[in-house]
Amino acid sequence: MSGSRPEVVARQDRVGPSLGPDEQSASRSGPGVVLQHDPAGDSAVPGGTGANDLGWDDPFRPTRESGDEYSGLVRALRAVQEAVTRSRPTPAVAAAAGACLSEIATTMREFEVDEDTQTAGKRWELAGRGHALAPPLHLDEITATSARGRVTVGRFHSGRYAMNGGVTPLIFDEILARLANHGRPWARTAHLGVDFRAPAPLHTELTVTAHFVRQEGRKRFMRGALHHGDQLLAEADGLWIELKPEQTHNISDGQEGAGR
């Protein structure tokens, strides 16, 4: 082989369900994009007016999608996760794609900031909050004591023909934690129990509900459910405990990058 990387060619004759609109739009640009530093954008927040827009205070409102550059980046990242999962590439294509992703990771490290300043996880208006770990949850209805949303899971989160059992708690923790902290002091998950009633299908819109049951001192009791139409797929009960002032510091401070 020569020293040049083999070209990664997009194919249309894939087997199985086609990519969704988000994945299709994210994958059209293809490899070879040159990332450049934009000094004028250092203090700007995609979809916002400045760095102060990205705080830890969650307004917890219904999802409002955005077409800005950062949300496009996250959609592309999810598309890569799904595409890699659904593929069986040749060694040459795997090496080429891995090299492209490594280049992107190197470029993004030039823009690394601390967790209080980062964008991921704090784009509260987006499904998934600008984070690609869990399936993006679209919030539709929110009150002081309840919330309802929708989620669709692809093969990246599959556990063989159905949603992986470990993904269900991620979805519940997202909606229950946000409701538990809605308009209240910061609390962390102390217990999250999930009972599975039926397999959750892939590529299908599922409904997630959350309810604030009661509060006893610093303890907040929560309940959630996951449905496919009228069929109950899973139930959750959780306990969130309000933090004491001395428990709100960064316990991981100084450990960042230790394993990189």
Image: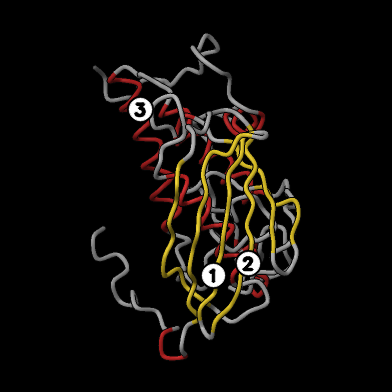
Q: CA distance from mark 2 to mark 3?
A: 48 Å
Which quarter of the rendered picture does the C terminus lie within? bottom left
Q: Which of the 4 image quarters holds residue 204?
A: top right
Q: Residue at x 47, y 17 (%)?
A: 9
Residue 109: horizontal and vertical position, in percent?
41, 57
Q: Which residue is mark 2?
A: 212
User: Which amino acid type is shown beneath numbered disc 3?
Assistant: Ala
Residue 156 located left or right of residue 69: left
**Amino acid, disc 2:** Phe
Q: Residues within 10 Å of mark 1 (few under 14, many from 20)?
A: some
Compare marks 2 and 3 and give the one earlier in the sequence: 3
- Circles 2 and 1 in contact, beta carbons < 8 Å: yes
Residue placed farthest to the bottom in the image?
Answer: 245
Discs 2/3, front: 2
Residue at x-position 47% and y-position 45%: 168
- Write the residue at 45% across / 42% down: 196
What residue is pinned by disc 3?
Answer: 96
Assess disc 2: are there few (<14), some (14-19) or many (≥20) residues with their C-alpha within 10 Å of its C-alpha. Answer: some
Of the two numbered discs 1 and 3 in the rendering, the one whose residue sits closer to the viewer: 1
The N terminus lies in quadrant: top left
Q: Nearer the viewer, residue 91 or 6?
A: 91
Decide: is 111 above or below 246: above
Q: Label 1: which residue? A: 221
Q: Label 1 vs label 3: CA separation?
A: 49 Å
N-terminal-most mark, 1 or 3 = 3
Mark 3 is surrounded, within 10 Å at the Cα level, by few (under 14), some (14 to 19) or many (20 or more) other residues, namely some
Label 2 to label 1: alpha-carbon separation: 6 Å
Q: Secondary structure at mark 2?
A: strand
Who comes first in sequence, dot 2 or dot 1?
2
Q: Is residue 43 left or right of residue 9?
A: right
Horizontal relation, residue 244 to residue 5: left or right: right
- Classify residue 223 by image quadrant: bottom right
